[in-house]
Image: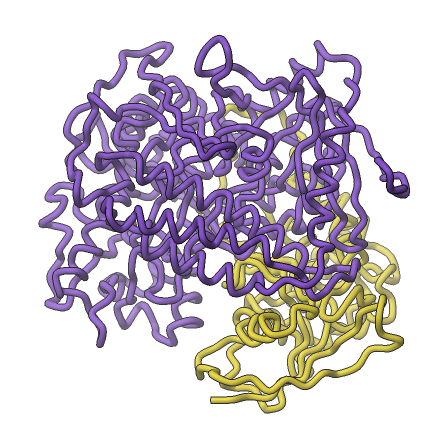
Amino acid sequence: MSISVSVYRYNPEADESPFMQQYELNDIAADMMVLDLLKKIKAQDETLSFRHSCGEGVCGSDGVNINGTNGLSCITPISTLKQPIEIRPLPGLPVIRDLVVDMEQFYKQYRAVKPYLIVNDPETEVEYRQSPQQREQIDGLYECVMCACCSTACPSFWWNPDKFLGPAALLQSARFVLDSRDQATEERLDDLEDAYKLYRCHTIMNCAQVCPKGLNPTLAIGKLRSKMLKQLL
Amino acid sequence: MSEIRKPIEKRRFDALVIGAGGGGLRAALQLAQADAAVAVVSKVFPTRSHTVAAQGGVNAALANVSPDNWHWHMYDTVKGSDYLGDQDAIEYMCRAASRLVIELEHFGVPFSRLDNGKIYQRPFGGQSQNFGGDQAARTCAAADRTGHAILHSLYQQNIRAKTNFFDEYFAIDLLNDEDGYILGALVMSIETGEPLIIEAKTTLIATGGAGQLYRTNTNAHINTGDGMAMALRAGIPLQDMEFFQFHPTGIAGKGMLITEGARGEGGYLVNKNGERFMERYAPNAKDLASRDVVSRAIATEIREGRGCGPNGDYALLKVDHLDADVVKKRLPGIYDLVRTFLHIDPTEEAIPVAPTAHYTMGGIPSNRYGQVVVPELHGAEEVIPGLYAVGECACVSVHGANRLGGNSLLDIVVFGRAAGNHIIEYLAESRFHRALSQDSVDSALEHLARWERRGGTESVDVIRSELQATMEEYCGVFRTEEVMKEGVEKVLELEARMQNVCLKDHSKIFNTARIEAMELENLMDIAVAAVTSALARKESRGAHSRIDYPDRDDERWLKHSLFFKQGRKLDYKPVRMKPKTVEAFPPKPRVY
């Protein structure tokens, strides 16, 4: 079958302003993913730039906006999409070229939550014990692939990307706050006490709707809120 | 030089690490914690590195589930390697395993847990208790996302240690001086297209494998063996490149990996008659025999007309008899993957699978300190000063002719750390930077400038597709003299056609066409190494399986091959058969 695709193009060396370019693609199989379309376009027009790597939804390189919704191109099937399929860069971040955005703001917020296990006790020669029930507390949190689909779908992040941590970083914060091995809970929660960092979340829930891994940052933020409240009391 | 170039920016570090997968990050962490100035260059943001896709787990004889010790692990690894593995390196890796997996846990890796709170372990292929006895459960797992869990934790620890990252920089060539010291690399910012010289007293290559050599593979787009090709161009040979692992269970026709953990959790393979055929090929280990054995079994079933599907070209992997909750809890990634790409529910239907290109056993010859070693004037293993290699791009060799599942994540943390430690010692003795040779800078720049050429009649996309198809057809699971000879010719023809490849897009900013062109150059160098080495080895050992030489020939071929790019020359060196602290495992017939 053939299919029409409309792709956001912008090369700062050549284009005065961004534009949408139409492509008609032939020999399209019904079970293809959006990434397959982008690769087909790349084969005929090598000037199109986009990020991709693992092709199976675990590396998180290929977050793009497809027909208005953020997702990973490699695991978004074309069968459910209305034509022409519109592919744009993730919204709210500066575009470097075509579908490639500058993710530094997103990574900065990730680094801001101290995304590493902090243990103050002397290091044992055996594993820190953790029951299966304790370990379950971080299911739905540790699987994040840092694709930025959630944060760039969040209006609060669009308005305050420098002050509001955004759903991805907050999910990461919850991943360590809820890890029974971590000993910096108090410090982590204190760090979030500020009008913007967490409290700019207005539970719009775009994040949970778009997460390609089926994670729920809003729920994680809710857990952080209640922990913060408990600590305050 | 006549032309005037604007000066190229230079940065100076103690240590340069090329590649930000598990091997590079583990080494970088060791270095950053020792207060060395370390730069990590990666063509993708670190958590996009292919370590992220490892599923089943990492081997260590923790004995949390079955009785175990490192010596049994060593035996299994030597046997798995079909005796081509270097026994001192294997001994070192297996001895270090438990400590380093505990260390990973302390870094924050969210391992699955047993009821007593210890790390969950599952059975994997080729694992035994007591030197070939009952099945062992040695693979430490974070569900089926162990690579993701480890890579993210290592990156996080590097954030904590304030490692310098050069994200989305592509390494072009190694730089050296007249005395042969490796002193960094020429790299390029993908975002700006500007070259950058990174000078360093030591350079560690940790750039992963070259699965993109094959059309159907389990690997990421980025796995183009860049570091291996850089080494080749610097005059360093590649070792054992004829040994390429085909994973038994890639999704048929598509390639996505289905972890061996699926069989570890109780899954098994059937042919079109519903027969559990592995019982015929490996009466004891059955579906948990070594990967080379299982891949050959599936390929044989298909060749002999017992494959499944309309074209009879795959086998079925059954996990639908297992408790659906076990599948969702222990194999959640597989559960998602199968539903996404096959539109079936693996708890209800069997999964179509076929042997799929997966892992490069060969690579840059190195020793157990991560130092790169080559034959020079005084022996087969002389150190190249300042150069290190670890992980899939290296050949220590702990995997020999066939890697055991769960040993690659182990390889990268063990030798990443070992290289880090050795670099720290080296730095203590090397207080000053040596001067770069301008020749080496110039030739690296020329390499980059080659892609400014215009005209040309060939495209990257076409040559890459033809190369992948050629490798699949002429250098696959089963090999013969006749077919491989043709394969060598075809690859050399493609290599010649590379001269006529030119880019249409010469822009600087985030030009992925330029990156893909240089990646194809790298793949081409490695393809030549692989087919040449494969044609020469006239025996069957591990993953190198020749129909015309069906037996292992220890008398003639118990040796490592070394391929040199200059003159496409082959050389050989002995396997290191002597461990340091235990008796050697002499070669014996390998049955599972």
Identity of the residue drawn at 69% across and 25% down: B176
Extreme front residue here? Answer: B2
Left or right of B391 on screen, residue B572: left
Identity of the residue drawn at 71% across and 25% down: B183
- Image quarter (top left, top right, bottom left or bottom right) of the C terminus of chain B: top left
- Image quarter (top left, top right, bottom left or bottom right) of the N terminus of chain B: top right
Q: Quadrant of residue A199?
A: bottom right
**Residue A195 x/y as whole percent:** 88, 62
**Chain identifier, colour yellow:** A
**Residue B370 x/y as whole percent:** 53, 24
Extreme bottom residue here? Answer: A83
The mark total stands at 0
Left or right of B370 on screen, residue B73: left
Q: How is the image coloured?
A: by chain
**Residue B360 x/y as whole percent:** 42, 42
User: Closest to the observer: B222 or B475?
Assistant: B475
Q: Colour of chain B?
A: purple
Identity of the residue drawn at 67% across and 79% down: A87
Identity of the residue drawn at 82% across and 59% down: A197
**Residue A156 x/y as whole percent:** 81, 71
Left or right of B224 on screen, residue B470: left
